[in-house]
Amino acid sequence: MAPQDAAGLFDAQDVGANEQQLRDLAAEVLGEVSFRDGGCRATGLEVEFTDVEHLEFDL
């Protein structure tokens, strides 16, 4: 995950995003960088976190 993407998660948290919103944002970012490669492959792929117990990001 690029630093600006992680920063976006922290920004969302700072402005009061709830757990579901943070999960959705993290899934979107990870889907983009891990599977869709900036739109070069797997277009239309939907990524969803389910049953997440713990997810931690640190800069």
Image (cartoon, rainbow, N blue to C red):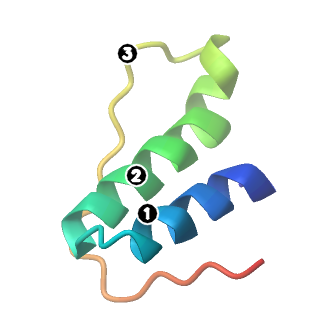
- Name the residue at 58% across, 25% down: 36
The answer to which image quadrant residue 3 occupies is bottom right
Task: Return the residue nearer the eye: 36 or 5.
Answer: 5
10 relative position to 2: left or right: left
Q: How many marks?
A: 3
14 relative position to 32: left or right: left
Q: Amino acid at mark 2?
A: Leu
Precedes in sequence: disc 2 or disc 3: 2
The answer for how far apart the CA atoms under marks 2 and 3 are is 16 Å
Precedes in sequence: disc 3 or disc 1: 1
Precedes in sequence: disc 1 or disc 2: 1
Do residues under tags 1 and 2 come within 8 Å of each other at their CB atoms?
A: yes
The answer for how far apart the CA atoms under marks 3 and 1 are is 24 Å
- Establish if 32 lies above or below 53: above
Return the residue at label 2: 25
Return the residue at label 1: 12
Depth check, mark 1 against mark 2: the one in front is 1
- Name the residue at 66% across, 39% down: 33
**Residue 23 position within the rendered picture, expressed as x and y whole percent measured from the top left:** 33, 63
Q: Which quadrant holds the N terminus?
A: bottom right
Return the residue at label 3: 44
**Residue 57 position within the rendered picture, expressed as x and y whole percent measured from the top left:** 62, 78
**Residue 6 position within the rendered picture, expressed as x and y whole percent measured from the top left:** 65, 62
Task: Return the residue nearer the eye: 7 or 42.
Answer: 7
The answer for how far apart the CA atoms under marks 1 and 2 are is 9 Å
Q: Amino acid at mark 3?
A: Gly
- Secondary element at tag 1: helix
**What is the crowding at mark 2: few (fewer than 14 residues within 10 Å), some, or many (at least 20)?**
some
**Residue 32 position within the rendered picture, expressed as x and y whole percent measured from the top left:** 57, 34
- Name the residue at 30% across, 73% down: 16
Task: Let me know if residue 43 appears in the view.
Answer: yes
Do residues under tags 2 and 3 come within 8 Å of each other at their CB atoms?
A: no
